[in-house]
Amino acid sequence: MGKLHFRFGVVNSNLTATALMFRHTYTQKKMNALVFKPAIDTKHGKDGVVEEMGISSPCIDFKIDDNLISLFEKEKELQKIHVVIVVESQFCTKAQIEQLREISEEVSVYAYGLMTNFKTELFEGSKRLLEISDSIQEIKSDCFCGKKATMNGRFIDNVMEIEGSEIVIGDEEKYRAMCYSCFKKEQRKARVYNKILKYLKIFENKTTAGTWFIPKRMQVNKIDPYVIYDEEVTAFINEFKGFEIKNPEQLIVVSDNLEDLKKIKMLDQSFDYVMTLISYVLELEKHKAGLLKALIEDGSLFRWLKQIKRAIDHEE
Ligand SMILES: [Zn+2]
């Protein structure tokens, strides 16, 4: 009688290599370990071989509709099996984890896999493993900032993906193990990238941002003139309001004078600085009507957005 063990970690924590080293401790004792690998995983070898960091082993590639008990029984006819090891166990279906649970009545099963996907949600296989394993052990690894990594971010060209399908086949996508703070920071940047940077094109040659509304003299309650912004600018303002602004105090030293604002040098300004600067201008607009209009029409806002893009693109 064995046990079902779930050993989980984040991406790039060499989970598969750890599993293969664990297998080695069995083969050294002349015991047979049966290794299962989801066929969907082509990153760690294919056609019956699993490999990571130069360590390799024969394995059985299984598909999502395969019954692992049948595969186990078939293998048992060829040799005595002392232990079962599953790599990339997050790709197992719920039913397959239940089959592993059955196998563990006979021999111990060790499932190595990721806990959550790039959206921070449990994989189907990992969820079932959490529910029915006898033991759960974390294989720890660090975020690039030094804190413990608990999340898996998926990046395309340095921008984290916040939408998309759980499994992407191919190697163009890049995963990073991250702590929650770094994940949150990247998530915010990705949202800016998707929602704010589309205005780069719109503001590039924008000559009119809106029209002045001048109240008539005879009005009883005196209303100051203000700008009615066009649809594009209004959409931008609304989109921008959805972003949390970090460290607004860094702008205390910035003048609210239009000419001074135009002169702010963008080179080397951080992503957060420019975001804060834009929110400051939107705030000022309430008392200094037309400020935003002037900054859009003279190309300043375009320049600022370009700096946001540059800051995101060039950040490591
Ligand atoms: Zn971190």
Image (spheres, rainbow, N blue to C red):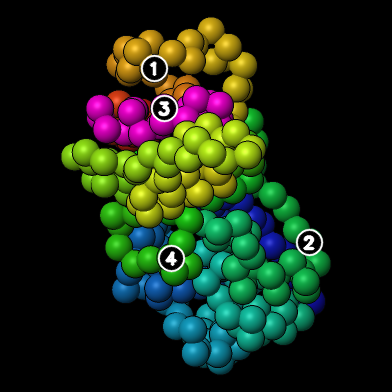
For the residue carrying disc 4, how many other residues have a C-alpha within 10 Å: few (<14), some (14-19), or many (20+)? few
Pick whichever of labels 3 and 1 is earlier in the sequence.
Answer: 1
Quadrant that contains the N terminus = bottom right
| Front residue (pair 81, 221) | 221
Magenta segment boundaries in residue numbering: 280-299
Q: In the image, which disc is placed on residue 258?
A: 1
Residue behind mark 4:
164
| Front residue (pair 242, 153) | 242
Q: Is most of the magenta stretch helix, strand or loop?
A: helix
- In percent of the image, x 46 and y 62: which residue is there? 163
Residue 206 vertical placement versus 235 (above, below): above
Residue 302 vertical placement versus 54 (above, below): above
- In percent of the image, x 60 and y 68: which residue is there? 123
Pick whichever of labels 4 and 3 is earlier in the sequence.
Answer: 4
The residue tagged with tag 1: helix, strand or loop?
A: helix
Residue 211: x and y, percent?
Answer: 35, 43
What whole-number distance in Å separates the C-alpha atoms at marks 1 and 2?
64 Å
The residue tagged with tag 4: helix, strand or loop?
A: loop
Query: Cβ of disc 1 within 8 Å of ligand 1?
Result: no
Name the quadrant containing residue 206: top left
Q: In the image, which disc is placed on residue 291?
A: 3
**What's the residue type where badge 1 is placed?**
Leu
What whole-number distance in Å separates the C-alpha atoms at marks 4 and 3?
39 Å
Contact (Cβ within 8 Å) of mark 3 with mark 1: yes
Furthest residue toward left = 205
